[in-house]
Amino acid sequence: MTPAYNLRHYGQKEAARIRQILLDVHADAYATETDEFHDQERFAWFVDHWSGLPGFDCVIAYDGDEPAGYAYGAPALHEREWWREYLSPAPDATDTFNLSELMVRPKWRATGLSEQLHAELVGQRPEPLAALLVDTTHPRVQALYESWGYEKVGERQPFADSPLYAVMLRTRTP
């Protein structure tokens, strides 16, 4: 049985208020990582970037008062759907929600929380498409997204020091 979590939505207006929660969950989730790409200072830049985008949407799961994980992203800017270059022909739909982060703290992993966070965030979005990147060295994470309807459409390394990512896209079924 999946534990019950309190899922709370936050938008761009609450970004400053939830910033430290996002950073703290990241620090716990990546506590054993040693690469510079996942360090706290770098991640703070990503949090500020994403939370500053129009339409930023975040769901934080709480177990009691303790944040257990979160998911956030923002709609892609029109004609800047970066995943399109991997498909020919690309889908007719143009509205895309970019899922930037889905993070669960170690204590709450393997509880079904990631699926709940994904469903609450992406499942509530009006955009017909969802796009995300998954580190190619994490095939189990990629398989999880595939089980939620995503398809790998290519690979991309967005920064010189970033991992190589699988580009994944999901079309909402009516």
Image: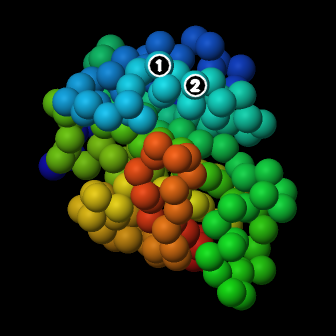
Q: Residue furthest bottom?
A: 89
Q: Position of residue 158 (x, y in %)?
A: 57, 52
Residue at 25% of width from left, 49% of height from top? 112
Left/right placement of residue 33 relative to residue 78 reads left
Residue 105 seen in render: no
Question: Which quarter of the figure has residue 14?
Answer: top right
Residue labelled with disc 2: 45
Q: In the displayed structure, does residue 113 sit left or right of residue 102? A: left
Q: Residue 90 appears at what percent x and percent y? A: 71, 81
Residue wearing tag 1: 41
* Image coords of residue 95 (percent x, y): 76, 62
Q: Residue at x 50, y 35 (%)?
A: 59
Proximity of marks 1 and 2: CB atoms separated by less than 8 Å? yes
Compare residues 30 and 15 and report the one nearer the observer: 30
Say how many tags the image has.
2
Q: Which of the two residues, 15 or 89, is positioned nearer the viewer here?
A: 89
Amino acid at circle 2: Trp
Rendered residue at 52%/47% (across/down): 160
